[in-house]
Amino acid sequence: MTVPDKTPDEKARDPSRGGYMQARFKGLLHIGAGNMFASSIIAGLLMGYLLDVWLGTAPIFMLAVGALGFVSGMLNARKNLLATGRDDRDKDSDRP
């Protein structure tokens, strides 16, 4: 018994071929990368501020730890965005 070919509408709705839901999910992952970036910066600035208040220093720690938060946010966002791109390349290799 053979399985009949899918109609164009069924192919468009097939989750393995992408489509609307995959595009929506990818958009949510990009929003997550932006939120991760922003939260890393805010966490760094807040921890630096608390260190400055505790040690009674000028905003040295706030700037230094805020810069570290910026760098870590960039690295995390880059890793997240590159991971979503890898999925697309793997799926594209299966297509004719």
Image (tube, helix red, strand yellow):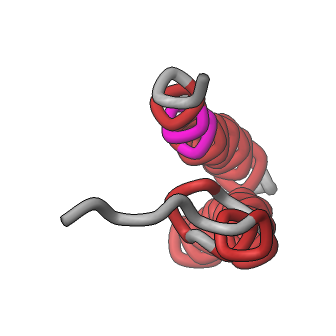
Q: Nearer the viewer, residue 66 or 77?
A: 77
The C terminus, quarter of image? top right
Q: Nearer the viewer, residue 56 or 64?
A: 64
> Residue 21 lies in what quarter of the image?
bottom right
Where is residue 92? Give x, y as percent: 59, 29
Magenta extent: 84-88
Q: Is residue 4 magenta?
A: no
Where is residue 95? Give x, y as percent: 57, 30
Q: Is residue 85 magenta?
A: yes
Q: Is residue 34 left or right of residue 55?
A: right
The N terminus, quarter of image? bottom left
> Residue 24 lies in what quarter of the image?
bottom right
Is residue 49 something one can see in this rendering?
Answer: no
| Residue furthest front as drawn | 1
User: Does 68 appear above or below 51?
Assistant: above
> Residue 15 lies in what quarter of the image?
bottom right
Give the residue displayed 77% in from the left and 46% down from the top: 63
